[in-house]
Amino acid sequence: MSDPHDAPLLEVTDLRVAFGDTEVVHGVSLRIAPGECVAIVGESGSGKSVTARALLGMAGRGSRAESGTLRIGGRELGNAGEREWRRIRGRDVGLILQDALVSLDPLRPVGREIDDPLRIHERMSQPERRARVHELLASVGMPDPAFAARRRSGELSGGLRQRALIAAAIALDPPLLIADEPTTALDATVQARILTLIAEIRSRGTGVLLISHDLAVVGQLADRILVMRGGVIVESGTAAEVLGSPREPYTRQLIAAVPSDVPRGVALTRPEPTGPTVAVLPEARRSREVDTTREPALLALDHVSKSFAVPGGRFTAVDDVSLEVHRGETLGLVGESGSGKTTVARLALGLTAPDAGDVTLDGAPWSRLDEHARRPQRRRIGAIYQDALSSFDPRWTVERILADAVGAATPGHTPTVSNHEVAALLEQVGLEASVARRRPLTLSGGQRQRVAIARALAAAPEILICDEPVSALDVTIQAQILDLLDDLQRQRGLALLFISHDLGVVRHMADRVAVMQAGRVVETGAADRLFAEPAHPYTARLVADAPRLARA
Amino acid sequence: MSELELRQTTIDAEIAHAPAARRRQRLRLPRVGTILAGAFVVFLLVATAFPVLLETQDPNQIAPSEAFEAPSLAHWFGTDESGRDIYSRVVEGTSTSLLIGVTATVIGLALGLVLGVLAGFGGRFVDYGVNRLVEVLFAFPGLLLALLVIVVYGPGPVTATIAVGLSTAPGYARIIRGQFVAIRSSQYVEAARVLGHARGRIIVRHVLPNALIPIFVLATLGIGQAIVWASALSYLGLGAQPPAPEWGAMLAAGRTYLSVAWWMTVFPGLMIVGTTISTTVLGRALARRGRGDA
């Protein structure tokens, strides 16, 4: 689609951005033609967002941006002042940010937000503008535009909010759109709709610069892909080239780390993958087959319901849910935000009591036990959370966290836990023993999640409840954590209840999958079967909407 | 207390985000103000423990021939109507004033802690009851509440201390309860429950330390205020009684001679101001440090 003879909408060469004495973007060049979608892919800290912002003259306070040429719509902007940039923004370039909740003024109706660029840049009467706002909202697929225009951003759902933000960005029909992680905070079905919308806008001739960490998203939309790492473009080419035959080891690593369609039991991280195609190892799959009929379930939820008091009634978070997790197997639990997944986790952990139904552990009562009787058995169920940092006492070092967990597991009350035990735990999760002296705050996201896993393992549990354990992590780190969980499961015969909104991750991890919608389990089944032939329409929609990486 | 000070702490947090402040924090160099405040507090501590070291003469020695002398090398802060040395009396009075301030804060904190723990851990109904009680206490201006206690139990330094402590308690109670509620529902407390730790152990190991460290910082800010209140009560003749050289009482005694002997009121007043400012400055430095570490 990119014709080099087309006058580019955006042309930048040798863009450098520095904060103080530290240069974070080292000479990025790119051009975008009308109707073309160029994507910058990278992990956090790669400099992709700073690059996008520098292209709008807003790299941030204390930053310095230099470039050989920076041309938008044929106009040289290398030395543009703030006043000139303000004329460019909105009219020549639209910007869509990740989180519409913080990008929109919570105190103003979204209609006013969309009206702003019209009022500032165009000479239009108020009725004309109102008609245009409604037209814009309709064009981004907002149901009932007139009603939505009067709502404040907090009164709209995440997907509708993101639509309103896109409507504001395209209000002046800018020839170029910069989208910085436009769907990262959204559920899969909403994400699919937003991506379709961006594709539509592009098909009208708008150039799109898409910034994302998610290769699957990028693969659906981009004509050309730039892979960024450490402030440098390490690889660029057409989407087919980059995803199909990547040259750089880093690109290969990124692609290999995407879990969707990688069979169960196949590692996502390998020092140097032979190619982007991962060979299916049949024995990897077979080794995990569990005969679910013969053996009693390790953890079972039997017609469990739980509701909470909310202003104006009760909200049923979990509605007549029955689930079973067997020894050594992984049950994936998927569903969109608000579907009750986390409440199921809390019920399983015995942190909250069901209103109706029973939770049993190894055939024995669990939810019916009183706290006193349950406490000695708690070590049998471990938990890891999405935000590992907030699950650690902020005053404690890693050593103290782990020693405390070991102490909890041994009722005989060991007064001093040896450094040996702590080091052994750290080694199991692939961390250096020197980490023991540090506080979690000074560790990276992946290291924190490893410490959380080590803490869960300290008590030698039989089952781990993992609530969105990798949702906050970069793809390559996510891949490492998933591989670690997989290894640990194999070594220890652990059962996992793996909760995630990400179908790709669940598909890679789970033997069996349960799909939740609005508090109910709508479908349960073997992972292969459920993803290949979903029986319930909601499952079918989830599967269809989940972005998948087209591997060569 | 507190509303204003809490706001001040927030402002502090914003200031701490400024680049210059961040750099200073990284180097861990105290500010000039902190050093001055620290020096003044050291002076106060010495004056409390060993007043004789700092006094130039007996604070209660009467010398009618030397009455109403202006500040000089012999009498640094001048003399009063009986010829007593103001400087020595101010030093002698430090222990009384400081003791009242610190004891009142401890009483307020202890009461606040009891109420806060009750509200935070006692279940829904206790929480409701404590909250209403705290609201009723809040409805009275602090000093009025202190006056009420004194009217019932009679004037004197002990009643004044208890009165000031009582009137600061609701503020502490509310903040402590808020801390407990926030920490009780935090994910690390939940993680400890999942590990199978007992409730009491979780409270002692996680909830109390994390809730109380910020409270102690807040209490250092409260000492200055308690001293001002105690001095105010003494000034009204409801606290320490003459001839005890308490700062507030000295202010009251000097009031009559304000036109002829300004030094009788200015120097005890400066001590109150200095003590309040320096404990507050130190408290805020502590608060900054706590944030840096957390």
Image (cartoon, rainbow, N blue to C red):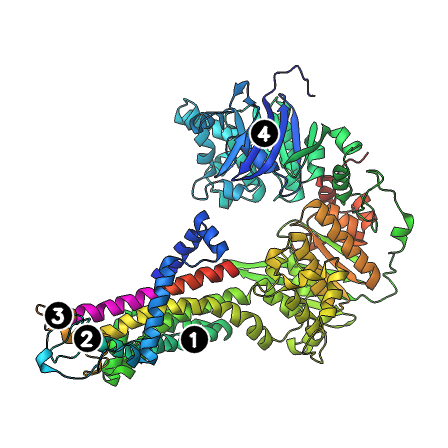
**Residue topped by disc 1:** B115
Q: Which chain hosts label 4?
A: A
Question: Which of these two is toward me, A427 or B169?
Answer: A427
Between the C-alphas of marks 4 and 1, the distance is 60 Å
Residue B90 picture quarter: bottom left
Q: Residue at x 63, y 24 (%)?
A: A31
* Secondary-structure class at tag 3: loop
Please, which residue is most extreme toward the right here?
A: A283
Q: Is residue A551 visible?
A: yes
**Residue topped by disc 2:** B86
- Position of residue A461 measured from the top left corner of the image (x, y, whole percent): 75, 67
Between the C-alphas of marks 2 and 3, the distance is 10 Å
- Position of residue A533 measured from the top left corner of the image (x, y, whole percent): 81, 44
Sequence-first disc among 2 and 3: 3
Up the image or down, B55 lies above or below A515; here it is below
> Mark 2, mark 1: which one is toward the viewer?
2
- Are the numbered discs 2 and 1 placed on the same chain, yes or no? yes
Q: Mark 2–mark 1 contact, CB under 8 Å?
A: no
**Residue topped by disc 3:** B70
